[in-house]
């Protein structure tokens, strides 16, 4: 169902809805999309499932594959792992305890907050960032779209990534241990389901990076269960509430700057959100221009996870909801003495270190280095002859990308409308020149009548060409 070739991708295309506009190819950070035969085509090896094309497609032709509530039938018991972003979809007067209880009401047997995993990862990062033997700037690795962006576009920066597993993986292991004891069943009979704001999380579970196997059974989009939660929330009474234990620092991971705040990195740090901005900053790191920075919190979605494409609330409204909620929770934590990570003490669960990551050969021109170098030269030659307008009319995002496609045999120079026009003009001029000539056997020398007739034909040909050029 989900296998789309060599790589799994949550983001997919509905060709029926696709109108062949160029909005998606211009926004893709890895130039993974082309328009061919009037439809978008996604290059699987380049796609990082950031979901930017989902946001930009006016025809809703880009969608994300996630699990559904019907998939819960695969397991005897099912545990919801809600991302803190879920809380931002509701006003601050709707308590987190009520939201967690709502998840139980719609079909889950238990709930374990991903914010708790964020707390544990934050504590591990505090120690890690104090080390003197790590490459700097250290780059956060909680966002799977950023990790894959580095694999595809900036493989030289893989060693800069913080080498810890994502908070949801930590929480999934904790939930399996706790609930297997509570339900007296083997962990394999329990399904852990991440309530996700973005498609990259689904991909990270189905095709984990740096892990042999994910502890998470699958993902369910926030947008998919939001309506169900709205229906059950009014029915929840005070006595139904579960005890809320995640701290404000863990919940704060939902917004940009939250990870930095919780991890407490050195003062020389950056918070970058939005995939295009992240790509620009990573390029600066690659060029060695960020040596004065110790740590970069890098997120693919504008505003952080609350800006994910699988959320329902407007990003700015969600951010306002979350900031108000964090203010309330922070005051409660200070009043009760609740500190980050205190509920995880004694769990014997540690944040695992991922194995070293490998680059994805998405940008590889050829496995043969000699052929690849030849193609590089060919690309530069072709690119110099293109107009450099990056209009996207050719179906490639930029003129540079078109030059690469031509060198790879996936496009031709006449795909560029400007080069096509030049070719038509050259052909028309050649036809005019040929019209003036006669075969040697028919050329009788100067003949006034033949000359006048030939001149008339030449004029007619030039008139037709001019009219055709004007109409175009």
Image: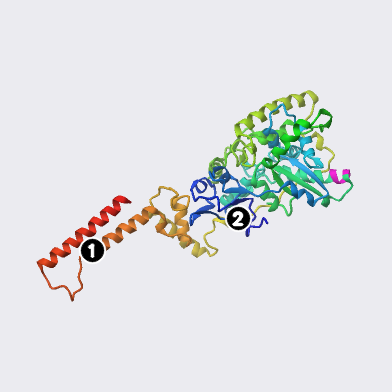
Q: Is residue 77 above or below residue 264?
A: below
Viewed as shown, does residue 339 lie left or right of 383?
right
Q: Is residue 7 above or below residue 131?
A: below
Q: Residues within 10 Å of mark 1 (few under 14, many from 20)?
A: few
User: Dividing the picture into quarters, in which one does residue 226 lie?
Assistant: top right
Q: Which residues are magenta?
A: 178-182
Viewed as shown, does residue 334 lie left or right of 435?
right
Residue 433: which numbered mark, if any? 1
Q: Quadrant of the N terminus?
A: bottom right
Q: Residue furthest right?
A: 184
Q: Nearer the viewer, mark 1 or mark 2?
A: 1
Label 1 sits on a secondary structure element that is helix
**Residue at position x 29%, y 50% from top?**
470
Give coordinates of residue 294: x percent, y percent: 62, 38
Residue 337: which numbered mark, if any? none
Q: Residues within 10 Å of mark 2 (few under 14, many from 20)?
A: some
Give coordinates of residue 402: x percent, y percent: 45, 55
**Residue at position x 46%, y 62% from top?**
374
First along the sequence among labels 1 and 2 = 2
Label 2 sits on a secondary structure element that is loop
Q: Is residue 459 above or below residue 177?
A: below
**Residue 19 versus residue 383: which sits nearer the camera?**
19
Q: Are marks 1 and 2 in contact (CB under 8 Å)?
A: no
The residue that disc 2 covers is 360
Give coordinates of residue 445: x percent, y percent: 12, 71
């Amino acid at each position: 169902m989900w296998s789309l070739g060599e790589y799994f991708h949550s983001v997919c295309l509905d060709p029926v809805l696709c109108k062949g506009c160029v909005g998606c190819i211009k926004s893709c950070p890895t130039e993974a999309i082309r328009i061919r035969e009037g439809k978008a085509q996604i290059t699987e090896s380049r796609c990082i499932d950031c979901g930017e094309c989902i946001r930009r497609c006016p025809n809703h032709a880009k969608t994300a594959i996630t699990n559904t509530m019907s998939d819960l039938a695969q397991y005897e018991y099912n545990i919801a792992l809600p991302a803190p972003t879920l809380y931002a979809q509701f006003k601050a007067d709707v308590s987190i305890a009520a939201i967690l209880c709502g998840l139980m009401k719609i079909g889950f047997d238990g709930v374990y907050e991903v914010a708790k995993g964020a707390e544990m990862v934050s504590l591990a990062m505090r120690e890690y960032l104090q080390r003197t033997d790590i490459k700097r700037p250290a780059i956060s690795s909680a966002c799977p779209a950023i990790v894959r962006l580095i694999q595809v576009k900036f493989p030289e920066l893989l060693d800069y990534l913080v080498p810890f597993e994502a908070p949801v993986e930590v929480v999934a292991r904790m939930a399996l241990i706790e609930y297997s004891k509570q339900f007296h069943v083997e962990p394999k009979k329990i399904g852990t389901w991440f309530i996700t704001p973005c498609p990259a999380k689904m991909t990270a579970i189905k095709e984990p990076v740096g892990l042999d196997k994910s502890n998470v059974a699958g993902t369910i989009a926030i947008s998919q269960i939001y309506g169900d939660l709205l229906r059950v929330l009014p029915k929840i009474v005070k006595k139904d509430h579960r005890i809320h234990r995640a701290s404000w620092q863990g919940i704060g991971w939902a917004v940009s700057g939250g990870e930095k705040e919780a991890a407490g990195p050195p003062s020389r740090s950056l918070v970058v959100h939005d995939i295009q901005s992240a790509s620009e900053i990573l390029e600066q790191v690659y060029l060695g221009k960020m040596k004065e920075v110790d740590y970069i919190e890098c997120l693919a979605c504008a505003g952080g996870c609350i800006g994910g494409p699988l959320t329902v609330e407007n990003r700015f409204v969600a951010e306002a909801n979350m900031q108000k909620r964090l203010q309330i929770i922070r005051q409660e934590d200070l009043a009760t003495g609740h500190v980050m990570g205190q509920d995880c003490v004694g769990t014997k669960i540690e944040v695992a270190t991922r194995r070293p990551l490998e680059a994805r050969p998405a940008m590889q021109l050829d496995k043969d280095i000699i052929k690849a170098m030849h193609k590089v030269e060919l690309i530069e030659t072709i690119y110099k002859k293109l107009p450099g307008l990056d209009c996207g009319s050719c179906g490639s995002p930029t003129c540079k990308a078109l030059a690469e496609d031509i060198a790879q045999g996936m496009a031709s120079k006449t795909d560029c409308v400007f080069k096509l026009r030049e070719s038509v003009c050259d052909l028309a001029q050649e036809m005019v020149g040929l019209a003036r000539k006669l075969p040697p056997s028919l050329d009788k020398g100067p003949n006034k009548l033949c000359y006048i007739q030939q001149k008339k034909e030449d004029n007619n040909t030039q008139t037709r060409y001019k009219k055709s050029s004007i109409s175009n």
